[in-house]
């Protein structure tokens, strides 16, 4: 569970610290699962299995789905921008920015029902994964002329999770580097899970 939430590296480092009375383990900025020298788009656009990239943990993917490279807009996942959220631009310091965004975002989450048994937990996790797979490719936003070529249609974004643009002028991607991530064709505030889905993997982390 710890690896799914914060990645294998953090789990290997801190897993032995879990005791019967441990309430939570939260990574400090240096340990947050995000590549320190890459911006949001390089770490988030395409999911894989590498540490610090989208696909390696729930925390990483949550930050990816709610952050941009340079738009200055921070309400993609909330009604109002969470206090303290910031762009994750290129260069060093991305871990600290991602960790700060994670802290800002989890404060916006509603209280979760407690799973008191292993069976209840398993059922809740299965429900969550079922919802996740059902939502892949469903948050496309049409811009301009609807794509006439297959490479630019919703078929090309069927493994995307998150908002993304569809337009006849460009194939859909999950990059946000053109300012506002939902105002330019071929951009999106999303994660492309195509590579993991082709491998028929059923879980993140």
Image (cartoon, rainbow, N blue to C red):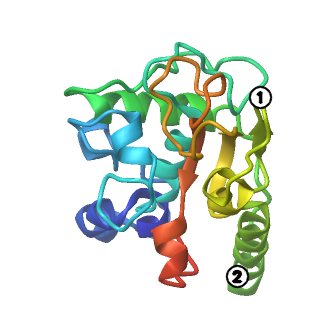
Residue tagged 2: 122
Q: What is the tally of numbered marks visible in this picture? A: 2
Percent coordinates x, y for residue 26 in the rendering: 42, 47
Q: Is 137 on the left-hand or right-hand side of 52?
A: right
Q: Secondary structure at mark 1?
A: loop
The residue nearer to you, when weighing 44 against 114, is: 44
At x 53%, y 44%, the residue is 174
Q: Residue at x 68, y 84 (%)?
A: 118
Pick the residue in front: 48 or 182: 182
Asked if residue 200 is positioned above or below residue 166 in the image, the reply reads below
Helix, strand or loop at disc 2?
helix
Residue 65: give its label: none
Q: Residue at x 59, y 46 (%)?
A: 172
Residue wearing tag 1: 144
In the image, is 108 to the left or to the right of 62?
right
Mark 1 / mark 2, whichever is N-terminal: 2
Expressed as whole percent of the image width and height from the top left, the position of residue 84 reads 51, 16
- Distance in Å between CA atoms under marks 1 and 2: 43 Å
């Amino acid at each position: 569970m710890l690896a799914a939430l914060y990645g294998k590296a953090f789990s290997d480092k801190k897993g032995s610290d879990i005791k019967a009375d441990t309430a939570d383990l939260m990574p400090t900025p240096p340990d947050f699962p995000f590549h320190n020298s890459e911006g949001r788009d390089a770490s988030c656009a395409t999911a894989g299995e590498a540490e610090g990239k989208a696909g390696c943990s729930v925390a990483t993917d949550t930050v990816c789905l709610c952050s941009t490279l340079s738009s200055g807009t921070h309400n993609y996942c909330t009604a109002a921008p969470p206090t303290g959220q910031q762009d994750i631009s290129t260069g060093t310091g991305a871990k600290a920015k991602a960790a700060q965004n994670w802290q800002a975002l989890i404060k916006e989450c509603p209280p979760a029902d407690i799973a008191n048994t292993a069976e209840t937990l398993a059922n809740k996790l299965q429900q969550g994964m079922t919802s996740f797979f059902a939502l892949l490719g469903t948050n496309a936003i049409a811009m301009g002329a609807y794509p006439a070529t297959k490479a630019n249609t919703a078929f090309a974004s069927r493994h995307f999770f998150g908002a993304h643009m569809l337009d006849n002028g460009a194939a859909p991607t999950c990059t946000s580097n053109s300012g506002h991530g939902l105002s330019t064709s071929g951009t999106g505030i999303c994660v492309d899970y195509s590579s993991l889905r082709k491998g028929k993997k059923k879980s993140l982390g």
